[in-house]
Amino acid sequence: MHVLPNSNVTGVIHEFVLLGYLCSEEAEILLFVFFSVIYILTLLGNSAIICAVWWNQQLHTPMYTLLANFSFLEICYINSNVPNMLFNFLSKTKTISYNGCILQFYIFLSLCATELFFLALMALDRYVAIYHPLHYSTIMTGKVCGMLVSACWVGGFLWLVTPATLISQVPFCGSNVIDHYLCDLGAMLAISCVPVPKTTLTCSIFSAVITFITLFYILVSYTLVLRAVVQIPKGSGRKKAFSTCASHLIVVSLFYGSIMVMYVSPGAASQSGMQKFLTMFYSIATPLLNPLIYSLRNKEMKVALRKVMCKV
């Protein structure tokens, strides 16, 4: 049995309990081992892509620069929630401070927003490369690429300032038990003292706006890209373009599918089990799968990764 700190019904809550996965201690040890392996493989896979791009001069192009930054983002993303989850598997109390919970909420969702911006930026890069190939080198310069990457990071963290501020003002005075393995939006709103429809609506609007705008931009970009690819004469160039686009679209489908259910319509994932599964999918599974998706479908990346393995 887990020892849960007493919640003060009349006072202010200073810490929360993250229930995580309700199972026996033996099962939690198995989950600890399982997620530890996933965590290590994710770090290794994304680090390998960063090293491959860094060490291979042929990959010093905007496309691979974006991919390396995306891999770094995935490392930050998985570090925002998995280490604490692994610690709680072995912890008896499973507590997190109030300020720590708000900070985790802000960082985790800011990285999520940054990933949405990055996926849109990668779609822009493919659009310029395939739809305007003759002007690609003059449009997507190193300076422009760096500015766009910086804008993704800054935009992602600025976008969550308002939702995080609103969540910090939600009154928590009853139960301090969050039925989740991290401080997520729906799970936190579920234990507020009183209904907060304005906060819920505002957070949903912020989530919907960034999700649908970036998704619409990605779909429009790839529609134009695929139309241009179809016009390319059959051969290696056409096959490579299709392969690159397919990799991006697979990642987009995996990430956006779960995100839209979780944050655009929180009621659709009201069951705690569904919330945990969807959160686990886009925050743990996709960072693990993304290096495989990009490397296995990219000949240059596979060659570069072999060189990295040889150096190691």
Image (cartoon, grey):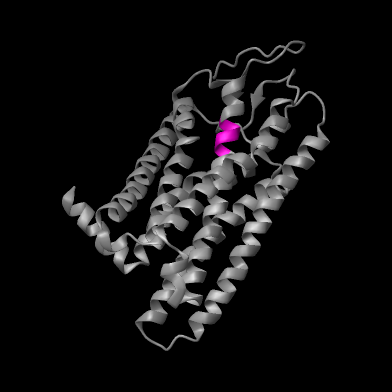
Q: Could you say which quadrant of the image residue 66 lies in?
A: bottom left
Most foreground residue, 23 or 130? 130
Residue 21's place in the image compared with 307, above or below, is above
Q: Is residue 6 above or below residue 176?
A: above
Task: Look at 58% across and 28% down and name the residue there.
Answer: 103
The quadrant in which residue 53 appears is: bottom left
Compared across the picture, whether 129 is left or right of 191 comes to left
Q: Residue furthest bottom?
A: 233
Query: As rendered, which of 204 and 262 lies closer to the eye?
Result: 204
Magenta span has 107? yes
Residue 229 is situated, as x and y percent measured from the top left of the image, at 49, 80
Quadrant location of the N terminus in the rendered image: top right
In the visual, does 92 lie left or right of 161? left
Q: What segment is highlighted magenta in the picture?
A: 104-108
Is 277 drawn above or below residue 65 in the view shown? Answer: above
- Give coordinates of residue 270: x percent, y percent: 71, 42
As rendered, which of 60 and 282 lies closer to the eye? 60
Q: Is residue 169 magenta?
A: no
Q: Is residue 192 visible?
A: yes
Relative to residue 156, is residue 213 drawn left or right?
Answer: right
Residue 193: x, y in percent?
A: 78, 23
Residue 7 x, y percent position in the rendering: 68, 14
Q: Residue at point 77% right, 38% down? A: 200
